[in-house]
Amino acid sequence: MQRLEKGYTQSIQQMTGQYLQKQKPEKSSSTKSELSFQEILKTTTTKPELVQNLKFSKHANERLALRNINLSAEQMERLETGTTKAREKGIQESLVMVDDLAFIVNVNSNTVITAMDDSSSGIFTNIDGAVIG
């Protein structure tokens, strides 16, 4: 809120109205170097990239070591692919299954939160989606 000379404050609505009245409409000019939204959308949807730099939390690294889980390059690629699929579906906290291994992944931060094998309880909480692949 903005202070007035006499110590009163204005409401957000009043300030918004004043701000919008002061704004001058900008001329829309597009240069050849600018891409349209449609072009950007087309390139991102036609070439889905794998998650780059999938990280493992301290907890996940401890679980991998404790349960003697070693991921092959192919399994790591499938984990990254599963994370990408979860992102495309709007999942934020995903269960990603790779063979008999289960991973909870925070999709927004590209971070594996925990890892489980088939000897674990099989109970998954605080997820909003799952990818089996």
Image (cartoon, rainbow, N blue to C red):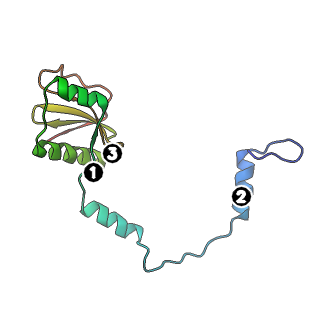
Residue 115 placement: quadrant: top left
Reading the image, the residue beneath label 1 is 52
Q: Residue furthest bottom?
A: 32
**Percent position of residue 76, x then y:** 16, 43
Reading the image, the residue beneath label 3 is 90
Q: Residue furthest top?
A: 121
Residue type, numbered disc 2:
Tyr
Q: Is residue 13 left or right of residue 113?
A: right
Residue type, numbered disc 1:
Gln
Who is closer to the viewer here, 4 or 59? Answer: 59
Inter-mark Cα distance, 1 to 2 = 41 Å
**Percent position of residue 132, x then y:** 16, 39
In the depicted structure, whether residue 123 falls above or below residue 87? above
| Point 35% across, 70% down: residue | 39
Reading the image, the residue beneath label 2 is 19
Q: Is residue 93 left or right of residue 22?
A: left
Mark 1 lies on a secondary structure that is loop
